[in-house]
Amino acid sequence: MPVTISRKKEERSAQESTSSPAAIEPDSPPRIGVLAIQGDYAAHAQALREAGAEPVLVRKPEELSTIEGLIIPGGESTTFLKFLERDGFLGSLREFVRTRPTFGTCAGCILLAAEVLHPAQESLGVLDATVERNAYGRQIDSSIQTGETQLEGGPLEMVYIRAPRIVKTGPNVRILATRDGFPVLVEQGGIMAATFHPELSADRRVHRRFVELVQRSRA
Ligand code: GLN
């Protein structure tokens, strides 16, 4: 899958690596954080770079003030919650996701949901959806599928790893792709969520969509 970032964008990204949102020019690459507590944050950072953004690894609550959007990666949502309960990180993150674009993949999708099942657990509650954890069985049932989406450019590869299932969505949630009739890629205002791992495929359409969402949020 060819990656279509312009050389100009890459150059700008390198030049502006120390800028903060306040200092950013309107068409500069957005500074997008990746919650780097656990999981495959490095692959997300690389995917963001390829999609024309400047990735920033976020490990402390105060780092949230330097970014324009955030990716919460896959991993283990219970482990994320345990870590976030320290240093008031969960409170800062709650505030961030209410006001800034955030993309949750797999465990990140679980953390964004309004309701979590199997078992019930705490969440950030900004995505009007009910998400069931580990809905496709155990690790051995992880799979790679190819499916249709609302994104332009044909079928999309989707890597599922102990994936959750979005079992219910509210009226404001836009469904961009489904698997067996259940949503797997959704959008609600500044929030995006996927039950699969787009960072593990070479196709950058999903990350590009999020980068564009962050760019639009500047206006
Ligand atoms: N099973 C994990 C959870 O419940 C999510 C798996 C993943 O992020 N790949 O948090």
Image: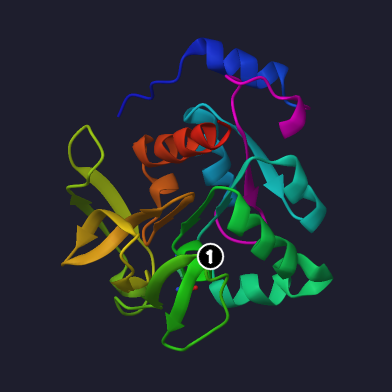
The answer to which quarter of the image holds residue 17 is: top right
Name the kind of residue labelled 1 in the image. Gly
**Residue 183 rendering spot, x and y as whole percentages:** 27, 63
Q: Is residue 197 at least partly visible in the picture? A: yes
The answer to which quarter of the image holds residue 150 is: top left
Say left or right for 169 vs 6: left
| Of the pair 95 and 59, the residue shown nearer to us | 95
The rendered magenta stretch, by its main secondary structure, is classed as loop
Say left or right for 78 vs 127: right
**Residue 133 rendering spot, x and y as whole percentages:** 41, 78
Q: Which residues are magenta?
A: 18-40
| Of the pair 187 and 206, the residue shown nearer to us | 187
- Residue at 47% from the left image edge and 70% from the top image edge: 113
| Of the pair 206 and 26, the residue shown nearer to us | 26
Q: Which residue is mark 1?
A: 75
Q: Is mark 1 within 8 Å of ligand 1?
A: yes
Check if residue 41 falls in the magenta segment: no
Quick check: 15 above or below 75?
above
Colour setup of the view: rainbow
**Residue 136 rendering spot, x and y as whole percentages:** 29, 75
Quick check: 55 above or below 172?
above
Residue furthest to the bottom:
119
The answer to which quarter of the image holds residue 141 is: bottom left
Quadrant of the drawing holding the C terminus = top right
Say left or right for 92 vs 173: right
- Residue at 38% from the left image edge and 71% from the top image edge: 129
Check if residue 32 falls in the magenta segment: yes
Residue furthest to the top:
8
**Residue 201 rendering spot, x and y as whole percentages:** 36, 43
Quick check: 128 above or below 173?
below
- Residue at 72% from the left image edge and 71% from the top image edge: 83
